[in-house]
Amino acid sequence: MASIGRSLLVLGVVLAGLGVVLMLGDRLPFRIGRLPGDIVVRGKNGTFYIPLMTCLLLSVVGSLVVWLLSRR
């Protein structure tokens, strides 16, 4: 039961941190989802958006978090 409690605590801290980042998103020096390297194609009838760099950044951060949590 202690491991479940620890996991829930870590998940809560991560969600709180994500909430703070989203609340302060306009004040950050970079726009999450609008990073250089994200591809935007605008046409007459619509827009096609590929968040390439955003996905890479989230993947690296997620991998780092999992690696840090798995170290014991």
Image (spheres, rainbow, N blue to C red):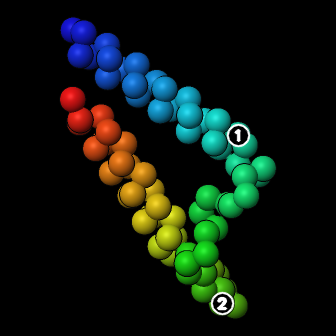
Q: Which mark is residue 23?
A: 1
Q: In the rendered image, which residue does mark 2 sit on? A: 43
In this rendering, position of residue 5 left or right of residue 39: left
Query: How busy is the neighbourhood of tag 1: few (under 14 within 10 Å), some, or many (20 plus)?
Result: few
Q: In which quadrant of the rendered view does residue 18 lie?
A: top right
The amino acid beneath tag 1 is Met
User: Does the CB distance between marks 2 and 1 fall below 8 Å?
Assistant: no
- Classify mark 2: helix, strand or loop: loop
In this rendering, position of residue 2 left or right of residue 62: left
Residue 65 position within the rendered picture, expressed as x and y whole percent measured from the top left: 37, 42
- Pointer 2 or 1: first along the chain: 1
The residue that appears at 47% across and 32% down in the rendered structure is 14
The residue that appears at 36% across and 48% down in the rendered structure is 64
Q: Is residue 14 above or below residue 8?
A: below
Q: Is residue 27 above or below residue 36?
A: above
Q: In which quadrant of the rendered view does residue 31 lie?
A: bottom right
From where the camera sits, is residue 49 visible?
A: no
The residue that appears at 33% across and 51% down in the rendered structure is 63
Report the Cα–Cα distance between label 2 and label 1: 31 Å
The amino acid beneath tag 2 is Gly
- Residue 45 or 24: which is nearer the viewer? 24
Residue 68 position within the rendered picture, expressed as x and y whole percent measured from the top left: 32, 39
In this rendering, position of residue 27 left or right of residue 52: right
- Classify mark 1: helix, strand or loop: helix
Quarter occupied by the N terminus: top left
In this rendering, position of residue 47 left or right of residue 2: right
Residue 27 position within the rendered picture, expressed as x and y whole percent measured from the top left: 78, 50
Quarter occupied by the C terminus: top left
The residue that appears at 59% across and 63% down in the rendered structure is 33
From where the camera sits, is residue 22 visible?
A: yes
